Image (tube, rainbow, N blue to C red):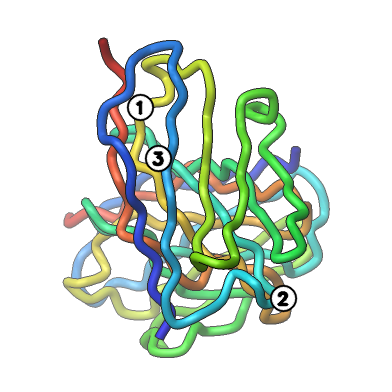
């Protein structure tokens, strides 16, 4: 299995802050990397697919970058509705795997 | 608009079989280019992919669960199902069904709301 490791596991930030979350794969996955946002009691929501493509309807303050083994999700200016847990996920392998999640909390 | 809805018992006894169904509307499980997946999330923990079924019937499972999992599709009802045998308390989780679609990569673009399954006697 391809292991996905996110950092940090949690972070505290304020509205308006620039937030960066990283995801590292245990082997190269090209750009087969997706990002999801999950709020308590809800299903995850797709934000970014194929490393850098913004899903339809997702605000442009979200962006993704990276290829190979190292990837980044950036929120350019954190909004109140962005406090949530974020997951990366690889689809390079037919056996899909997720990162452990990064919880973005209010500072 | 594609919608997915999970259904099934919310309580299963240890050693028994967990059975869930995902009803798909606004899309077809008979159409190629999509994998129909199950994903679970234990309370307070992260996401774990369980496996998928393709329209052709081809399946692929998480190696850690492979010996206990069966996922199948019913084209006539436009739904797909999960069976997990010999459950224990460690299988207590919210179970999501999701569509795994191609767009420069495969990604889970539509999800069901999730259903909590508790394993307890």
Q: Is residue B44 above or below residue A84?
A: above
Q: Where is residue B37? Give x, y as percent.
A: 57, 55
Which residue is labeled 2 in the image? B33
Q: Secondary structure at mark 1?
A: loop
Q: Is residue B41 left or right of residue B116?
A: right
Instruction: Identify which residue is drawn at 74% across, 69% down.
Output: A31
Residues marked 1 and 2, same chain: yes
Q: Where is residue B88? Give x, y as percent.
A: 42, 15
Label 1: how many Cα within 10 Å (few below 14, some 14–19, many 20+): many
Alpha carbon separation for disc pair 3 and 2:
26 Å
Which residue is labeled 3 in the image? B41
Q: Is residue A64 left or right of residue A61?
A: right
Q: Farthest residue in the front direction?
A: B76
> Reading the chain from its start, which is encountered first: label 3 or label 1?
3
Out of B4 and A54, give the one closest to the viewer: B4
Is mark 3 in CB contact (under 8 Å) with mark 1?
Answer: no
Q: Quadrant of residue B55?
A: bottom right
Q: Quadrant of residue A30?
A: bottom right
Instruction: Identify which residue is drawn at 69% across, 40% down.
Output: B61
Instruction: Identify which residue is drawn at 58% across, 41% down.
Output: B50
Which residue is labeled 1 in the image? B92
């Amino acid at each position: 299995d391809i292991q996905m490791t996110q950092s940090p596991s949690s972070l505290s930030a304020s509205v308006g802050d620039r937030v960066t979350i990283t995801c590292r794969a245990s082997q190269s996955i090209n750009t087969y990397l997706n990002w999801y946002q999950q709020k308590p009691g809800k299903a995850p929501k797709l934000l970014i697919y194929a490393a850098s493509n913004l899903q339809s309807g997702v605000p442009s303050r979200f962006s993704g970058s990276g290829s190979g083994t190292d990837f980044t999700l950036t929120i350019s200016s954190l909004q109140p509705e962005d406090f949530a847990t974020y997951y990366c996920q690889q689809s390079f392998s037919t056996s899909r795997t997720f990162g452990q999640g990064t919880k973005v909390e209010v500072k | 608009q594609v919608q997915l809805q999970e259904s099934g018992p919310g309580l299963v006894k240890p050693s028994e079989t967990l059975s869930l169904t995902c009803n798909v509307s606004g899309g077809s499980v008979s159409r190629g280019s999509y994998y129909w997946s199950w994903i679970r999330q234990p309370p307070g923990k992260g996401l774990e992919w369980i496996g998928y079924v393709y329209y052709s019937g081809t399946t692929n499972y998480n190696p850690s669960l492979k010996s206990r999992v069966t996922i199948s599709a019913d084209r006539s009802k436009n739904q797909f199902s999960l069976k997990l045998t010999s459950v224990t308390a460690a299988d207590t989780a919210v179970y999501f069904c999701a569509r795994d679609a191609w767009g420069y990569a495969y990604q889970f673009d539509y999800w069901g709301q999730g259903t909590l399954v508790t394993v307890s006697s």
